[in-house]
Image (spheres, grey):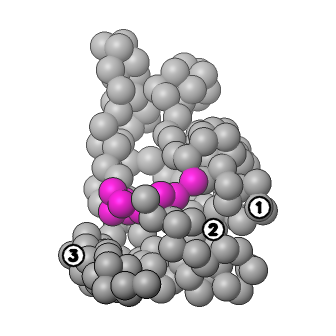
Amino acid sequence: MDRSIPVALLAVIAVAMAIGSGSGSDIFAPEQPIDFSHRDHVRGSDQLDCALCHSGARRSAFGGIAPVERCMGCHRYVLTTNPEVMKLRRAWDAGKTIEWVKVYALPRFVRFNHAAHALAGVACDSCHGDVGSMARVARVTDLSMGWCVTCHRAQGAPVDCLTCHY
């Protein structure tokens, strides 16, 4: 069997990942359109579970973000004069969504499924860090192929290339 095709394919994937993921060592904590504090919602008196706002994480490939309607379920009545909640209210009144800045993004050729990880019992903070302690969410892991493979090996999860790549 000619091994040059699989070797070439792996080389292309490695180069694309290096280009697509940057250095991987930078802490990335983008400013968001609303200064939302996970610390207040997760660690404070609210004690909200990740899945309340990121409901897709347990049932689909994408974690998703809560729609404005979900936020307004509480903020119709709670902290209504807070400037950040007022931004939320303006979006709600205008029928608009909040354009959150993505903190984690994988290259397009990587297939990641939140539901598979949630069903396997992988805690959110394994990949996202202690978000409940963050005033502003930061990317704390590089989610590089090496980082993921190391985790998969430690957990006895598949490390076959087709597990994660199209």
Most foreground residue, 103 or 79: 103
The mark lying in front, picked from 2 and 3, is: 3
The residue that mark 3 highlights is 19
Q: CA distance from mark 2 to mark 3?
A: 26 Å
State the residue at coordinates (31%, 13%): 94
Secondary structure under the numbered disc 3 in the rendered image? helix
Secondary structure under the numbered disc 1 in the rendered image? loop
- Where residue 68 appears, x then y in whole percent? 46, 26
| Upstream in sequence: badge 1 or badge 3 | 3
State the residue at coordinates (60%, 22%): 73
The span picked out in magenta is 104-113
The residue that mark 2 highlights is 125
Q: Amino acid at mark 2?
A: Asp
In the image, is residue 132 above or below residue 58?
A: below
State the residue at coordinates (47%, 58%): 111
Q: Residue furthest left?
A: 19
Residue 120 is labelled as: 1
Magenta stretch holds residue 109: yes
How many numbered marks appear?
3
Quadrant location, the C terminus: bottom left
Q: 10 Å neighbourhood of mark 3: few (<14), some, or many (≥20)? A: few
